[in-house]
Image (cartoon, coloured by chain):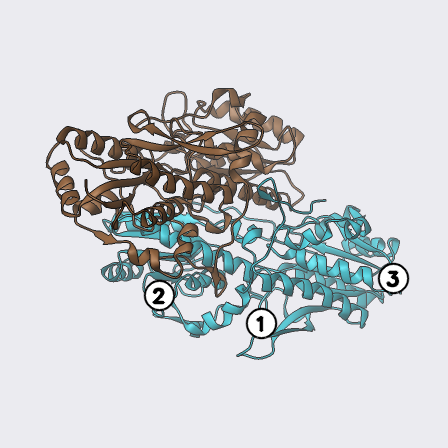
Chain colours: A brown, B cyan
Amino acid sequence: MFKNAIIGQSGGPTAVINASLYGVIKEAMEQEQIHRVYGMKNGIEGLLKGNILDLKDVYETKNFDRLKHTPASFLGSCRFKLPEIWDETYQNIFEIFKEYEIGYFFYIGGNDSMDTVSKLSAYAKEIGFNIKIIGIPKTIDNDLYLTDHTPGYGSAAKFIATSVKEIMLDSKVYDMESVTIVEIMGRHTGWLTAASALALDTKDRCELMVYLPETPFDMEGFIESLKDRLKLNKTVIVAVSEGIKFADGTYVCETGQALSLDNFGHKSLGGCGKVLENEVKNKLTVKVRSIELNVLQRCASTCASKTDIDEAVMAGKNAVTYALQGETGKMVAFVREKESDYEIKTVSVDVENVCNKEKFFPATWIYDICNITDDFIAYVKPLIAGEVQVDYENGIPVFLEL
Amino acid sequence: MFKNAIIGQSGGPTAVINASLYGVIKEAMEQEQIHRVYGMKNGIEGLLKGNILDLKDVYETKNFDRLKHTPASFLGSCRFKLPEIWDETYQNIFEIFKEYEIGYFFYIGGNDSMDTVSKLSAYAKEIGFNIKIIGIPKTIDNDLYLTDHTPGYGSAAKFIATSVKEIMLDSKVYDMESVTIVEIMGRHTGWLTAASALALDTKDRCELMVYLPETPFDMEGFIESLKDRLKLNKTVIVAVSEGIKFADGTYVCETGQALSLDNFGHKSLGGCGKVLENEVKNKLTVKVRSIELNVLQRCASTCASKTDIDEAVMAGKNAVTYALQGETGKMVAFVREKESDYEIKTVSVDVENVCNKEKFFPATWIYDICNITDDFIAYVKPLIAGEVQVDYENGIPVFLEL
């Protein structure tokens, strides 16, 4: 069996995807069974172009630790879907594996990336190529099956909770009724938007209305509920997922505009906050504004959760352990040991049970359409715990860059 | 002369406006010449409604220090313009001053708020009311005359520089040409947008195009320059002020929409990033997206500049000193002692020379339309220096709230 390892990153970046990369590199470099550790630039797409680099220099650089706190994908990313049939793409990939003597393949990504892990391990099995292929989860969306949560989610949730709290203070400065709509990422699942509930200490969270993609959005119902909330609160915050849909299945953000498609055929979402803002302007005489939290949700390094960073490193490290134990076609997953006292361990799960599926926000954690239960708060609170110390130079954070 | 003091906040909030409030309260409470320290809720507007509170409890609260790191206006704000003629509004205000035995009046705000300071001190002089009226500058816009810079600007600049750096990393993850437009606050002046240049270490900053309101915006010229930049860089960041205008004086964000007006008759800006995004989509075959940094620019507590916080406290403290020295109708202003080794002292300046004016970004610090000189970098770097430690509870920052 070949003794070199290769690592790639795929899909949208997170604040901690490089912490997992750090974990993989560190563990792989320290294990005798592994000789060289390669990185593929821009994931499987770059691999196919031969964009491969030896990560020894990165590991030995003085500021290697900064990788843990560097947002975005250090190695670059891709949105490349492997063909459904075993064509020459697969042959080319395995030629490269042979050329570089790759015995271990690690891929850090979300559902689409786990599809790559699944397909490559199935192909390896078919051709009898002895390689251990392990997926490491990352997605701010928290929508992967078989894992308590995903690395990246805790930091995004912390950023969202912090920002919504600050926006809420900002919205209260004038002595007037106001509605602030905060548009949050989340194409099909509401995990991120629900994290806005962390911004309020009060049990009822009456100042906050939360709309997730899991519940069909009803514009009239929204306006009526908003009127009721404004009777109780001078300022109301409306947290909405970018992917909220009407009952007929059209995205709210599609109102008045056509959406473009990405490489995976997904519609590029964005703008539902503006749609709601316009509706409120038309229906109510109240000050209204909308705010898109946008990409800072996934790249605000200084707002990252320490728990999330530590767990992301652990996921990378344990991926190497599983591979060396001979496992393949697996994804590293988190299991919560106890409910009361938060403690996380990892297990390996079959990646074909994870890929191309989405874990939705539980219906039982939503009540009266736009409220989040305390069960969710209990679930999410440990994930945002702890703060990080990022290195600064000249007043701004410094990161590790290729 | 009366021995009580009153303090108010006015205009848009900043991340450090409460640090100045902290400075005023602390200093006023510690000076024997001042007896009670009152706060007006929602500035002069709240004062007229009798919304006045004794700040002794705030000063004595265990977590008083948290006020320094609390974003938005602790006392609430207003956008209230005093009449040009000395009508009953003035009589009512001074009746309240008499009732509460106010001898010292402190007002923390921007240009419009300094107008209030100017008018009240002129009226006091006219009626022979012995009161010391001092303005304390705050505005993220950095557009006040007679001061090296304004409290609030450094923290906003630090947030913008950090965010643009993170967005830049995020924009590079895919192996494709891309343009990211970052819309930054700044109605008439480009101080905030220029701070995006801090995100790049390189001397030429060729990946960044910066458009400020001080330079008329030419859409064709922008597209041509962007094409040139894309020949040199795979990813380009375009930082634009919300208030950029075409040569004919119309706001770029007015393209295709009518803008609403606020209480001061200012148009509510926003959306020029989207206008540019659409233009790039129509003209070039490159991935493009736009991001509005929005209100987090003025309320991101965890990204505040330590220098800015310290100076905001000093401005509040010294306002009390000036009042006790008998000064009135003044604003606290910053003077940079030396160019080489950053050191700031305060002076008092005549508020009528400050109010209703705007200090523009120097034309000599802009070259080739969309580039910022190193002179600006030298000016702004000390203002973003140092990080702050905010208190956290349950994973999110905790603030002092009324």
Q: Which residue is mark 2?
A: B205
Whichever of labels 1 and 3 marks the residue nearer the N terminus, that label is 3
Q: Residue at x 73, y 52 (%)?
A: B64
Name the quadrant containing residue A242. top left
Which of the image's four quarters has the C terminus of chain A? bottom left
Mark in front: 3 vs 2: 2
Q: Which residue is mark 1?
A: B148
Horizontal relation, residue A207 to residue A29: left or right:
right
Disc 3/disc 2 C-alpha distance (Å): 55 Å
Instruction: Tell me the amino acid under the disc marked 2.
Output: Arg
Front residue of B246/B42: it is: B42
Q: Which mark is residue A261?
A: none
Furthest-front residue in view? A32
Measured Cα–Cα span from mark 1 to mark 3 = 32 Å
Upstream in the sequence, badge 2 or badge 1? 1
Circle 3 residue: B3
Label 3: which secondary element: loop
Asked if residue A280 can be seen in this view, the reply is: no
Q: Are marks 3 and 2 on the same chain?
A: yes
Residue type of the residue flagged with mark 1? Asp
Q: Is residue A92 left or right of residue A163?
A: left
Q: Looking at the image, how many numbered discs can be counted on the residues? A: 3
User: Distance from label 2 to label 1 (Cα)?
Assistant: 25 Å
Badge 2 density bin: few <14, some 14–19, many ≥20, Cα 10 Å = some
**Which amino acid does the dot numbered 3 rest on?**
Lys
